[in-house]
Amino acid sequence: MRPAWSVILLTTLSGAAQGLVLFMVLLEWLARGRFIAPLDDRFFTTGGVIAVALAVVGLGASFFHLGRPERSWRAAAMWRTSWLSREVIVLPLFIAGTAAFAWSHGVDGAAALAAGASAAALSIVLFICTGMIYACLHFIQEWASPLTVVNFLLMGCASGALTAAVLAGRLAPQASDVAIVGALVLTLAAMLTRAASLVRNLRLRHRSSLQTAIGVRHPRIVQKAQGAMGGSFNTREFFHGRSRALVRRVREAFMVLAFLVPLALLGAAFAGAELVLPLALAIQFLGLLAERWYFFAEAKHPQNLYYQAIS
Amino acid sequence: MKQLALVIDLNVCVGCHACVTSCKEWNTSGEAGPLADLEPYGRDPTGTFFNRVQTFEVGEFPDTETIHFPKSCLHCEEPPCVPVCPTGASYKRKEDGIVLVDYDKCIGCKYCAWACPYGARELDPRRKEMTKCTLCVDRIYDESLAPSDRRPACVMACPTNARLFGDVHDPDSEVSQAIRERGGYSLMPEWGTQPANQYLPRRKSAVQIAPDQITRVDNPHRKDGKPPMPRMDSPSLDDATSW
């Protein structure tokens, strides 16, 4: 598949926002349960505003994916069958819940707790919707796995927790250690599940072949013409057009940038060098952009079997 | 329930692309809007087509065979492109099973194209809407046309009659009989999409013959030489002697 920057930005930015909300709500519950010292309302307000901003930028980016953005309001119609439609509904709800979460802090404690719970629930539902958009396409075998949903959830939570750690360093030092440990654990978990899906996909055997695509039982079939010389939607949308070496390099790069380097920097931060946290966040976000690019580039659509040679 | 579909006979398709051009001509001129035709005389002409003919070579020289393979929307009975559409623009008609796009509802998110394993849908680069084969729904029900013309443009254009059109749920229709009697098959059956369109395989009419069928081993002439001369007084059929 051709990676679309609009979708890459939507899923990474919104994922970070969702993770940030989940982690802030976790910190709030820990503080209310007196497991950590009480936190300043400013931490939640600022964090909420940042989460809203990230999600809104992601939502804005997603419009560039549409051919007819002026009709996008129609996309809420088919929530009974379409995971994309469900995402379209849940994303604005999540933004609204997060905005209520940010606003209610310092205004009404009980309302803040309720808004936090609903924003967290919407965040998880949104992760499931986003992941299922890809996981439900069962003939794109690289995506058709529960690992897809788990990866979206854990990578979003990891980047969100790291954002919370950066924020806690400024506004809630008493929660800083918890946030760093949280980010560390979530980044490690995300690395493990992402590595698991990488291993799965490298060992994948595709069920479709040129034989099933045109229905001729012969081991040697070669395409001689695809019906067009100058390309078509099928060649533009479903091929990334990059070399295998580049794709492999992106894979190695994102494992290092999104997981290994942030893990090392988080370790350093836990040891006391908290100044590296913003750097860790920047590097991880870059890594997650590469990860999402690879996620699309790696997927082999069965329609590509019909477009192997021009002439 | 009716399910209109095409049956494509690979045995007689000669790869002339008449169905491709006829399809484009009809569908770019209709009410639904034009289909893009970019740089038609340039270096890299491209555009939207509902139907394409591809060519494959099967086997290794000198034992090769060329297969011309027309490819369009298969109007699946379980179309994976329909439930994923967030707006309901992509739908399957109950009355005749044609899978259509309501262009006015399409937001151009391309999700249905991702969800089609056959690559049958194309986003028009000008209109930014998803387009696909309509089975010439604006032709086949047009009562101002002569009944023999109420068929898809590609079927009308095919010079070798490689494209059959009809109701595959009616067991007595031409298409059902062709599928049943001439080995009709589906593309990528592994995904359970149950394509309504079917393909008829290439067939070679080879005669299975053994050497002993060419030379008659029990020929009495060969075995015994000349037949014996009949006796002079033996009766003959016409009371005349043959020797």
Image (spheres, rainbow, N blue to C red):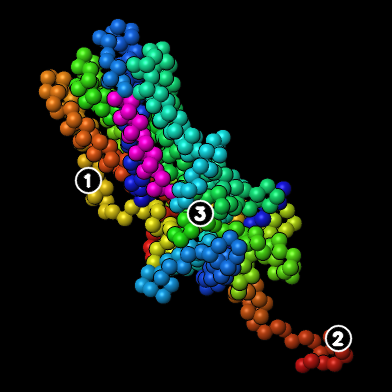
Q: Considering depth in this image, is B128 or B208 the residue closer to the camera?
A: B128
Residue A296 appears in which quarter of the rendering?
A: top left
> Residue B68, relative to residue B222: is it above or below?
above
Tell whether label 3 touches label 1 (CB within 8 Å): no
Q: Is residue A167 magenta?
A: no
Q: Considering depth in this image, is A80 or B232 the residue closer to the camera?
A: A80
Sort mark 2 into few (<14), some (14-19) or many (20+) by Cα contacts within 10 Å: few
> Is residue A254 left or right of B15 when viewed as pictured?
left
Residue A268 placed where, x, y %? 13, 24
Which residue position holds label 3? B130
Give the number of the disc on residue A249. 1
Residue type indicated by callout 2: Leu
Which residue position holds label 2? B237
Q: Earlier in the sequence, mark 2 or mark 3?
A: 3
Sort mark 1 into few (<14), some (14-19) or many (20+) by Cα contacts within 10 Å: few
Residue A162 placed where, x, y %? 25, 26
At a point 42% along the width and 35% down the height, the residue shown is A130
User: Of helix, strand and loop, which one carries label 3?
Assistant: strand
User: Of helix, strand and loop, which one carries label 2?
Assistant: loop
Sort mark 3 into few (<14), some (14-19) or many (20+) by Cα contacts within 10 Å: many
At a point 43% along the width and 57% down the height, the residue shown is A234
Dot in front, 2 or 3:
3
At a point 41% along the width and 75% down the height, the residue shown is B41
Q: Residue furthest front?
A: A107
Q: Do the residues marked 2 and 3 share a common chain?
A: yes
Residue type indicated by callout 3: Met
